[in-house]
Structures are given as C-alpha cells and as structure tokens.
Amino acid sequence: MSDLCRLLLVVIVAAALWAGGAAAQSPSEQHDALTRARGLLATGDYAKIVEGVQAIAGSGAEHAGKLLTAMADRKAYVDKTGASGAYRDGSDVFDMVTNEKLAALPDGAEAVRMNNRVRNAIKAALGTLRLSAKDPAMRIAAAEAVLRAGDVEALPALDEMIGRESDAGVLEAFKTAQAGLILREGKRPVTEQLAAIRLVGARGDNEALGVLRAALQSPEPEVQEAAAEAIESIEQRLAFMANIQNVWYGLSLGSVLLLAAIGLAITFGVMGVINMAHGEMVMLGAYTTFVVQEIFRAVAPGAFDLSLLVAVPAAFLVAGLVGIAIERGIIRFLYGRPLETLLATWGVSLILQQAVRTAFGPTNREVGAPSYMQGGFDLFGLAFTYNRLWIILFTLVVFVALLAILRLTPLGLQMRAVTQNRRMAASMGIRTGYVDAMTFGLGSGIAGIAGVALSQIDNVSPNLGQNYIIDSFMVVVFGGVGSLWGTLVSAFALGVTNKLLEPWAGAVLAKIFILVLLILFIQKRPRGLFALRGRAIEG
Amino acid sequence: MITRALFNLSDAGSRIFLGVLLALAILVPASNLLLPPDSAFHVPTHVVSLVGKYLCYAILALALDLVWGYCGILSLGHAAFFALGGYAMGMYLMRQIGTRGVYAHPVLPDFMVFLNWPELPWFWHGFDNPLFAFLMVLLVPGVLAFAFGWLAFRSRVTGVYLSIITQAMTYALMLAFFRNEMGFGGNNGLTDFKDILGFDIQAQGTRAALFIATVALLALCYVIARSIVTSTYGKVLVAIRDAESRTRFLGYRVENYKLVAFVVSACMAGLAGALYVPQVGIINPSEFAPANSIEAVIWVAVGGRGTLTGAALGAVVVNAAKSMFTTGALAPYWLFALGGLFIFTTLFLPKGIVGTIGSLFRRHGHEAPEAKEAAEPAPGLEKVQQ
C-alpha cells in the first residue's frame, strides 16, 4: 500500500469516525473492548491478534481507524504483559486505549506481530469501518472501493452491513459490492452466485467485467455459463457506448469543420469566390485570441476568463477587415475568373502566413483556456470535455446568427439579391461593390471567430489555416455550394463518419477513406448534397 | 505524321525554344566535363543537377499547361502524378542498392528491414528491371489519371470543383504515403540511391547524362504537346476550354477529349518526376503536398498560360528565383515574393511573360516577330546558367 493510499484511508476513516457513525458503544464499553484487544495483541499468537484487530474495529472508538492503520505499518506497540500499548501517528505517540498523547513509547513495548493474515484482517476491518460511515455518499464510496479492490475479507462485514442499512442507494451499492465479492470468493452456493452475476451484470461497466471474468474460473458450469452470458451482454453494451462516444467525438469534429467551413460557405457558396486564404483568416482569429489574452494577462489577470468574450468580436473585426481589404484590393478585379481568384488568394495566404511568422515567430503560441472550458464530466460512463461542448454550442450559435443575418437583415437581403442576379440588383439601386465587400468581410470575420474556437483545441501556429483549408472546401462542396443548411449537414456527417471509421481504420486511413468517398460522391452529385436548383447549364 | 509534327514546329517560339534546349544540352555538360574547374566558364556538377531539376519542373509545367492552358482543366493534383512517377523511379533505384544498404539485405530496402518486413510486398516486384520501372513511370500516373478523369469528366465535374477534388486526391495520396504500412518508406521516403543503369549516380558523367536526358525529354514532351495543340484535336480542346457546353452540343464527346489530354499530361508529369528523383537524390511524401501543385500552376501562369514555351520558361524563372531567395539573407522574404508573384501575375499579367510579349508584338503588326521574341526566353535561362 502506498503512502498516498494510506493517507487516504486515514482521512476517510477519521472522517467516518468523526462523524460518529460507529460510536455505537459507550465510552466505558469502548475502553473495555480496547483493553481486551490490547491483551490479545500482546499474546503474539496470530489467531489472537486477528481477534484483537476485530475487537478494535468493533469497539467503535474514535481512534480505531488510526490505530489499525498504524498497526498495518507496524507502528502499533504493546509490551509483553499487555499492560500498556501505544501507536504512532506521524511523529507523535498515543496511548492505545485512552488515545492520550504520550511523551515516549512505554518501556518494553514492541511492534505488534504481523503476518498476511493479520494484514488482511486489518484491511477488512478498515473496510468495515468505512462501510459504517455516517455519510451515505461515503458509504457508497467505500462499497465501490471494496468492489474495486476485490477485497474478499470484507465480505462478512458487508453481509452484516446490508442487514443494517436503511438508505436505498447505499443498500444497492452494498449489494453490488457484496455480489462482486461473492463472485471473487466463489465459495457461496450456486444460486447465490447466479444472483450475484445478475446483480453485477446489471452494473455493466469495466469493473463488472473484471469481476465476471474472475467468475469464469468458477468450477460450477452454471456459474461459468451465466458469467459468460453476462460478459457478452456487457461487452455489447460497452461497444454500443463506445459508438456513442465516437458519435460525440464526431459531432465535436463536425462542429470544428462547420466552424472552419461556414465562412467559406459565404465567400465560396454565396459569392462564388474561391478564397484559398480562408484558412489564414482562421489563423488570424487564433492569433487575435493570443494577443487579447496577452493583454488580459498584462492588464487584468483576474478577468482572464473574460478574454474569450473579448476575443470573439476582436477576431471578427480583424479577420473581417483583412477580408474586406483583400476583396477591395484584389478579388474585385477577378470576378468571373474563379481560377485566377484561386491563385491570387493563394498568394495572399502565403503572404499572410509569412507575415504572421515574421511577427510572432514560427513556433506554436500558447493560448490559455478560461476556467469554464477546462475539465469535463462523466455521463453514463461517457467522457465529455467542456471545451468540446462549448465549441459545439458556439458553432450552433454562430450558425444561427449567420442564418439570421442572411434572412432578416437588410444586408442579408441585398447579399441574396446580388448573388441571384447582380445586374438586376444593381439596377434596383443596390451598391453591389459595397455588398460584395461586406459579404466577403462577413465570411472572413466568421472565419476569424472560428479561429478563436480552434485556438482552444489546436496549436496556434502560422500553419493553422493550412490544416483546415482542404477540409473546409470538401465540407462546402459536399454540402452543396450556396446552401448553409447543406454545409451544416455535411460538416456533421463528415465529422461523425470520420470518427466512426477511426476505430477500424486508424486516424489517417479514416481521413483518406473520407477523401476518396467525397471524390466519388462528387462524381455522383457534382453539385453536392443540397444543390441549388437552377436553369443555368454551367455553374 | 512526323513531317506534320516538324511542320508544327516551324513557328518562331518553337524554334527558339528547341534551339535554347539544344544549346543547353551541348554547352552545360561540355563545360562541366571538359573545362577545368577553375575556368570561368566551368559549370559545377551541383549546378548541372540544379538546372536539371528546373528542367524537370519545366516538363511538369508543360504537362500542366497542356490541360490548363488548352483544355481549361485547372488540375491542383499534378504534384500527385509527378510524385508517383518519382516513386516508380525511386523504387527502381532502391532495388539497385542491393546489398550496399545499411542492413546489407540482398532484396529488401533498408526501411523494410527496419520495419521487420519478411518479404518484398507484391507491388515492389519487377522494379529491379529498369524497363519495367520506366514503364511504370508512365503507367501508374496514366492509369490514375485515366480512372480519375474518366469518373470526373463523365459526370461533368468542371471548373473549381475539379480543382478542389484534384487537390483532395493529392492530399489523400500524401496522407497515404506518409504511412509506414504503405511500404514506400513512410515519412523518409526513398533515398540513399547508389547507381542507375549500372552507373554511379553521384558521378559527374552520370549527372551530365541525366541532364542531357532531361533536356531531350523536355524537347520531346514539347514536340508532343505542340503537335497535340496544333492538331484538329487540339483545336477541339481549345473549343472545350472556351465553351464546353457549346462544343458538346456540336456533337463532340467532350469527356473523351478531356480524358486523353489529362492522361497524356499525367504521363508527362510522371516522367518529370522520374527524371527529378535521380538528380535530387530523394523522393518523399511531401512531394504530394497540394501546395506543390499550386506552385506548379503559378509557374505556368507566370510564363504564360496556353503557350507551352511560357510554361517551361515560367518553371525555370520561378524556381531560379526561389533558389536565389531561399539561400541568402532574403530567405524569410521568399514567401512574400512568391505570394506577391501570384497576385501580381493574376492581376497585371494574366497572359504571363510569353503571352504578354506575344500580344505586344501582335499590336505592333507582324514585323519580324522572330527577332524580338528571340530576346524573350533568354533572360530566365541566363539566370539559370550563371
């Protein structure tokens, strides 16, 4: 037993005893029980020592836990006559019976003799002590610990506790633990073991699997069979859970893809501009986050949790303004020449990458996570991390906001008008050039926002954008150019498919499969899942 | 057929281009092999290989110009064909190492011994035979291009969609070749070559011979591409480029025309890769990177899309500039320069160097275009020779 475990035990036991759950006996009875135990420990006979250990555990004395823990470490001492006894707790020495602090060990005191049998008895006694803690949550935790440790010695104590337990939740935990111990021990009648298998099988997690595997060794064929069946059903359940977990990972990946692609869905989908510098807009957003956080660290370290709230609009503005500059400076001269736009924006992306590399250095930059994005939680045995959860929520918010801008605002109306018929829109008095710049700025700004989210889960380096550009294009093309809903469906479909393929194929091969599937899909439906219907023969 | 091909070369651009290539093929190896190292006109061996590398890129650019310049297919996946050709050559060169590898295994290349592979995978068989390997150099990219093009063109995937999926193709191949399990040396690729066709690959003479072969094959590719674009078939290609639907409505099977051009182009790119590998000494998966394909497109754009000679010129000029930039104090600014070049070319030089000069002359009437165009390919090539 490591020191840490020991410490934990002491804490748990002390807490349990402090709670007074075990103090069923009056002080004088405790005193008598401990005195009797001291005599037993002094005999040097292992059977008697075990009896003594049980007497201490049964005494209900406040220091019983500490004393037993010390004894396991050979730090409990008695003299040969059994007239005096003490134990060490840290550097202090306490009397075994009265628990008064002593100046030194009594004369002639020797460490209580120890063998494995005694050790096991101590362990079981400690388990019992914990099982009788006052706090129900602590009792459940103790039962879990017993089950996990497979501590067969605790079985009699557990049997006894079940008789006394009144709390339904604790009772259930006790019964499961008891069932686990029964299976580990394998000595109870077959019917009882079969009932235990049912109980443990219902638990259905990895602990249960371990216990049931032990039951496979049982000499009774019935028990073996029942255990095998239970194992199979648990494994199916676990496989199912693993799939759910993968779907969750897939949704998480899908939200990242959607965030990266949604800005592209505007610039490419709505405007028909191939913006190869889109990834660099994402990168700019991530670096904006870094700069905002640096400012927060320097000016207001206490408000660091707010840094992302500030970074989102900042990144939107930075990336949006850069986007408008690109549109006004380069792209507007290339409308109607998509392939040239592709080349020019690729040039822009090279320049932006190099500019960031010159300004911030080629290495990864550290972007911190605010406290509400750290850690995670378990639900039905599935692990969820807060940062992924936030990103999924954030993505959906961005998506809805974008949809609202396109549907509900005057700018959105003008954008759609220009997209559908530029010349008609112009003759209606819409400043198409202004709308183009705003649309491109909006798409770029959203890419910047994506950068804020991606800075939380990816390395912030000048190459950040390059990792997403091909994926983003695939998402937009798969979903159907010009359809925001298509982009949503396609991002999540690709993300989930990728993660479901990964357990079979490995991460790289899964990605290759996805790419090949996409290439084949585009042959079948060259305009994507949700193609805009039109009468033009050439898009 | 041959006389027609030769007739097609009677224009000024072709004559100058082939003349320059002939001069290169004679002068560079001669000055490398015959002149003493301290002579002012001596070309060091590493420069021979460097120029050889540029000329490999020129073949790739030529291949790209054939599909992009004349057929309107902007392939962002030509790096894949280039790298596949390179890998085919690399596999041959690996097999030639024999027992001289670190592990001295008679059959297995070092990386396979390192990975505890018991035997040669099936796709490595036959690559000890140079003829088979050289066939594969053309066949592997050709078959991939055929399969890819057959699917894509038949379902009328055009324009930017095609660009995006060709990019996805080369990206997928890059990821695949990075895997050790693929059996192509994973991350490290294939390297440490010893000899080619029995000659030491490091030797001065071999280097010169490789250079001459590259020039000769560049010339051959040019002749082939030129005869394609000047033929009736080439005219249909241009028609497809300018108005695909109209051409289809006139009764041409557009997809077949495109497919042929795409496959020929892929084979040329494979050939370029195969010549590139022995001169550079390594092939690894980063050659598949989509960025490489896009860079190749800019060579064509800089030189002049749809001019063939311009594509080759662009490849040499851009790469010579890259060599100059990335070796000196200017190294951090290379990406600025390259990015600027992309933007400048698309905005101000849409016809590229050759195209712009050509149209300048046309504006001034047809007076002696040969004489003036003669001055044009020279600056880039001079830069290379220094």
Image (spheres, coloured by chain):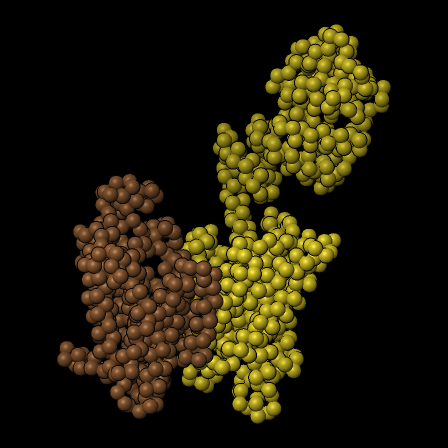
Identify the image quadrant of residue B271.
bottom left
| In this rendering, position of residue B377 left or right of residue B178 | left
Quadrant location, the C terminus of chain B: bottom left
- The residue that appears at 52% across and 56% down in the rendered structure is A362
Residue A258 visible in the shown view: no
| In this rendering, position of residue A391 left or right of residue A103 | left
Residue A307 visible in the shown view: yes
- Chain A rendering hue: yellow
| In this rendering, position of residue B352 left or right of residue A154 | left
- Chain B rendering hue: brown
The front one of A491 and A23 is: A491
Quadrant location, the N terminus of chain B: bottom left
Residue A515's place in the image compared with A207, above or below, is below
Identify the image quadrant of residue A153.
top right
- The residue that appears at 54% across and 48% down in the rendered structure is A237
| In this rendering, position of residue A71 left or right of residue B276 | right
- The residue that appears at 63% across and 81% down in the rendered structure is A411
Q: Position of residue A347 (x, y in %)?
A: 46, 70
Q: Position of residue B184 (x, y in %)?
A: 32, 52
Q: Position of residue B126 (x, y in %)?
A: 21, 53
Residue A426's place in the image compared with B194, above or below, is below
Residue A317's place in the image compared with A67, above or below, is below
Residue A6's place in the image compared with B86, above or below, is above
Q: Position of residue B81 (x, y in %)?
A: 32, 64
- The residue that appears at 56% across and 41% down in the rendered structure is A206
The front one of A268 and B5 is: B5
